[in-house]
Amino acid sequence: MVTRKDSCDSEGNASGRYLFPTFTNYTNRAGLALPPSWNSISGLIQFQIRPGTKYIYGRAASQGGVYRGGSNQMYINNINNLMP
């Protein structure tokens, strides 16, 4: 199970490709280095990744200031490989 902090498009559809594998106290804007101007984080959505899907896994890089990064995250190119 992976989770996505997401903003939605004008029709309410989640569209982010960055995911995180677990939700902890450190999984927040600072840990994910996610300024509000990049994502309004209007909700949390959980998914399973379709078996065989390729993704990139690593730590969020610092964006400076309070957005220090360091939390684990994943990038998936095709969001159709996410199963509710």
Image (spheres, rainbow, N blue to C red):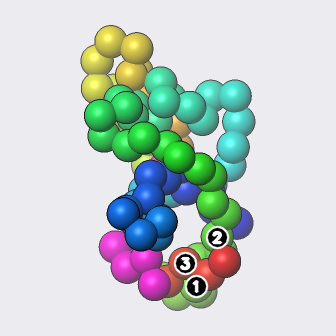
Q: Which residue is mark 2?
A: 47
**Looking at the image, can residue 55 be seen?**
no
> Hey, which quadrant is residue 54 in on the image?
bottom left
Residue 77 visible in this rendered orientation of the protein = yes
The front one of 47 and 56 is 47
Callout 1, which amino acid?
Arg
Tell me which residue sits at (34%, 73%) in the image.
77
Residue that numbered label 1 is attached to:
50
Does label 3 or label 1 sit earlier along the sequence? 1
Marks 2,1: beta carbons within 8 A: no
Stretch of the chain drawn in magenta: 73-80
Residue receiving disc 3: 82
- Could you give the CA–CA distance between mark 2 and mark 1, rounded to whole angstroms? 9 Å
Question: Which residue type carries mark 2?
Answer: Phe
Q: Residue at x 64, y 70 (%)?
A: 47
Q: Residue 48: x percent and y percent?
A: 65, 74
